[in-house]
Image (cartoon, rainbow, N blue to C red):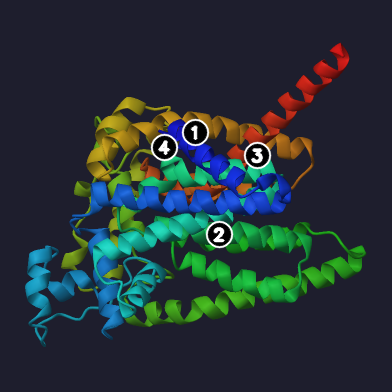
Amino acid sequence: MLVGSYVVTTSLITCKLKKIGCKFMSLEKKFEIWVIVLAIASLIFRIGLVIEHSWHLQLSGDTFYYHWLGWLLAHGYGFISPFMFFHDTTAKYVAVNLNHINSYNVRVPTVFHPPVFSIFLAVGDLVGITSPRSQLILLCVIGSINVILISYLAKRIFNYNAGFVAAVLAAFYPAMWIIDLSLMSEQLTQLLIAVAIFLAYRLNENPSYKLIVIAGVFSTICALTRAELIILVVLYALIIVRHKKENLKMQFRRKLKMLAVLGVSFAIVLAPWTIRNLVTFKYPEIISADGGTALAITFCHSMYYGPEIGYSNFGCAGKVKLTKDESVFDHIETQKGLTYIEAHKLRTLLILAIHEGRVFYVFKPVQQATSIQPYVDNIPIYASISEWISSYFVNASAILGILYLKRRKLLQFPLLFVVSVGLIAVMIAGGDIRFLSDAEVAIVILSSIGIAGLYGTVKTKFKLKVDAVS
């Protein structure tokens, strides 16, 4: 599917460019047109998939939470649990309940997921993007914008060829569009990660105080979208520490000031949400209360010894919608997961490796692609299989991309750091490919660099042979 999309798209683009006289354009102009056309093609492709597979999406669990919390925020109810407010998670019940909102609708504070994605949906709700269908289309638009950002990053880091390959991969690599098929935060997260990588490279070039403040604020926004992204502030701190400009004494003083500015800008934005949580709930919740559930459903008996070892089983956790204090639920589930880990330390090391093996399709790939993912994540089986097959090519070329960056002495640290964030998320939360989505942006960029680098090497060797013969 990936290869077919590449051929069709490049053919259409070539025809278009010939008609408008591309041979008289600059390389930059050609690149811009190619990427924009690819982004539009990606948008059409994504919307078609949503209509075909998710047009009648049944909201439940996380999708129910995000959608209805967005509605509650837009209608002035604040951060309260949609599970408790609507008493049920069925669309029919909620539809009836909306017409009879009164004092019996329980208003319980929520911190189950980070707030930014629900705020994003609430803003959409205020401008008329209210239904799950329209919200899915909005996420498709976000995905197509990400095509442009990722291609620009690859071009900026390596060359134009890498930028074009990155655009193709970002548009049609299944790992980048599978996440459009469910109303979850992954697509917005990938957009934020692309911007975070851009900021990291800009900060490495010129660590000005203005840019450091932006980096600190932005890393907080990322953390409030996906809790594990709180570690991005460490990325920016390491870039500041690694940077070399003035003499050693000036370096030390200036870097201390920069690190202080980064920390303060990060803390100021995070503080209101964290203080609200500390005051509201029994147990401390810095960003969200979903970590306990992740531990409980991943580190339990059926996921250590069952046929679906290394994945996650929601049957191992309680029901968050039944609690009036989510921090208590999070505390109980966290202790449950940690207790099981403590009792099975050696087995846990194997399970952590299996988590990584599942998302990279080296452990039970057939079961992962044809049985678990279509059932658990509601992914069409053709999408799951195409993601399975194409991931080997993309991941292998990403390794090649690392080697090319190292050979040319180009900065690779931000990309590797982002990949490591995704690997840590998978290690903790289990072998669901959704948890690798944090790393996919960096993987696609590295893959495009690997392909472009290989193309350049082959082209150069071929030219040398031709010159030698002539």
As measured in the structure, the alpha-carbon distance from the residue carrying label 3 to the one carrying label 2 is: 25 Å
Q: Callout 2, which amino acid? A: Ile
As measured in the structure, the alpha-carbon distance from the residue carrying label 1 to the one carrying label 4 is: 27 Å
**Quadrant in which the N terminus appears:** top left
When the figure is inspected, residue 371 is found, relative to residue 147, above or below; the finding is above
Q: Which label sits on residue 7?
A: 1
Q: Position of residue 58 (x, y in %)?
A: 18, 56
Q: Position of residue 220 (x, y in %)?
A: 53, 70
Q: Callout 3, which amino acid? A: Ile
The answer to which image quadrant residue 318 occupies is: bottom left
Q: Is label 1 in a helix, a strand or a loop?
A: helix
Q: Could you tell me if residue 342 is visible in this image?
A: no
Label 4 Cα neighbours within 10 Å, binned few <14 / some 14-19 / many ≥20 = many
Q: Which residue is mark 3?
A: 449
Q: Callout 4, which amino acid? A: Val
Q: Which residue is mark 2?
A: 231
Q: Which residue is mark 4?
A: 359
Viewed as shown, does residue 394 lie left or right of 457? left
* Nearest to viewer (mark 1 / mark 4): 1
Label 3 Cα neighbours within 10 Å, binned few <14 / some 14-19 / many ≥20 = many
**Quadrant in which the C terminus appears:** top right
Q: Callout 1, which amino acid? A: Val
* Nearest to viewer (mark 3 / mark 4): 3
Residue in view at x 50 percent, y 70 percent = 221
Q: Are marks 2 and 1 in contact (CB under 8 Å)?
A: no
Label 2 Cα neighbours within 10 Å, binned few <14 / some 14-19 / many ≥20 = some
